[in-house]
Amino acid sequence: MAALTIAALVLTIFPLSLALAAVSDLFTMTIPNRVSVVLLASFLILAPLSGLAWPDIGMSLVAGLAVFGGCFALFALNVMGGGDAKLLTASAVWYGFNHSLLAFLVTVGYVGGAVTLIFLLLRVRANSVMAMGIPLPASLVTAKKIPYGIAIAIAGFLTFEQAPIYSLAMNAFQ
């Protein structure tokens, strides 16, 4: 019973946190710090309980540090927002330092490019879109930023099944 509860938590906390971050970023152009804190704390609690080996947990933290280093550089260059950097870092630990992290980051890049193009097109055509009666949050039309939390969330949804902790959680149901 306990193993199923832990597996259910692994399979729900990560996607729900990403969904919350994406919705918040869409409507407010901010990602609450508590989302990143919940992601990191949940991983630290659930990883050993789900059976992830201690060396793998350590490498997951190394993955988070590596992603944080890259995000910090992008933040310093004013290319990435602080909320996006924290969300990407907290999400990276769920993947570990392996092929699944690379798949996640590459997917973030591709989806981020698509999201950026969509939002730039929406902003160019904002008057036409609003005239058609499609309600857009004002922040999408007037903001200079792109809500990249959406891309991070979509990439997480698409690649989470490759993460080692996901596999462990799914095995608990068999």
Image: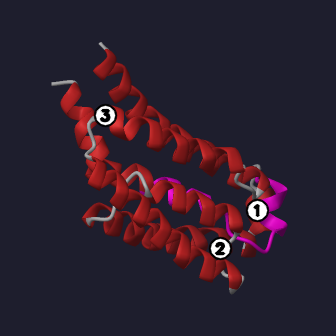
What's the magenta region? Answer: 136-155
Q: Position of residue 123 (x, y in %)?
A: 74, 71
Whether residue 165 is situated above or below residue 116 in the rendered picture: above
Choose top left, top right, bottom left or bottom right for residue 155.
bottom left
Whether residue 124 is situated above or below residue 161 in the rendered picture: below
Check disc 3 and give the amino acid type.
Answer: Ser
> What secondary structure is marked by label 3?
helix
* Residue at 79%, 74% in the rendered image: 144
Q: Would you say the residues marked 3 and 1 are in contact, meaning their CB atoms lie under 8 Å apart?
A: no
Q: In screen coordinates, is 174 left or right of 161?
A: left
| Residue wearing tag 3 | 50
Which mark is in front, 3 or 2?
A: 3
Q: Main secondary structure of the magenta part?
A: helix
- Quarter occupied by the N terminus: top left
- Quarter occupied by the C terminus: top left
* Residue at 34%, 61% in the rendered image: 59
Q: Is residue 152 magenta?
A: yes
Q: Position of residue 113 (x, y in %)?
A: 51, 75
